Amino acid sequence: MNQKKPRAELFKFTVNMNDRGNIELDMDVVNPDEFTKVMEQGMPSFENTFEVASLIRYLQSMGNEMMDNSRRYL
């Protein structure tokens, strides 16, 4: 049996076209401060908490930029 390793989705950006031909942009992102808090409480031995939180902030800023800039095309 193939067992999947646990994973946590931290950032997701999707672009869909609905049945009317309209484009739908969606971004789901974990709050980096909440991530840090949870990791410090639940996995204090994990050494890269702040690096991952910084990556989440970067991805969030890039996602926001994509959302803003895509309005020119829609």
Image: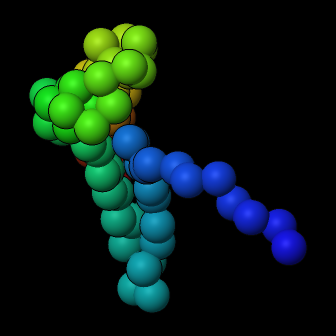
- For the N terminus, the image quarter is bottom right
Q: Is residue 34 visible?
A: yes
Image height of 30 relative to 18, above or below = above
Question: Is 62 or 7 nearer to us in this picture?
Answer: 7
Image height of 55 relative to 26, above or below = above
Write down the quadrant of residue 68 in the picture: top left
User: Residue 14: percent from the left, percent from the top?
Assistant: 45, 55
User: Residue 71: percent from the left, percent from the top?
Assistant: 27, 44
Residue at the (31%, 50%) spot, across then down: 27
Write down the quadrant of residue 4 in the picture: bottom right
Residue at the (33%, 31%) spot, across then down: 43
Question: Is 55 or 71 nearer to us in this picture?
Answer: 55
- Give the colouring mode of the picture: rainbow
Q: Is residue 65 visible?
A: no
Residue at the (45%, 87%) spot, across then down: 19
Image height of 31 relative to 25, above or below = above
Write down the quadrant of residue 49 in the picture: top left
User: Residue 2: percent from the left, percent from the top?
Assistant: 83, 67
Of all residues, the one furthest to the bottom in this rendering is: 19
Of all residues, the one furthest to the right in this rendering is: 1
Residue at the (14%, 36%) spot, across then down: 34
Question: Is 54 or 8 nearer to us in this picture?
Answer: 8
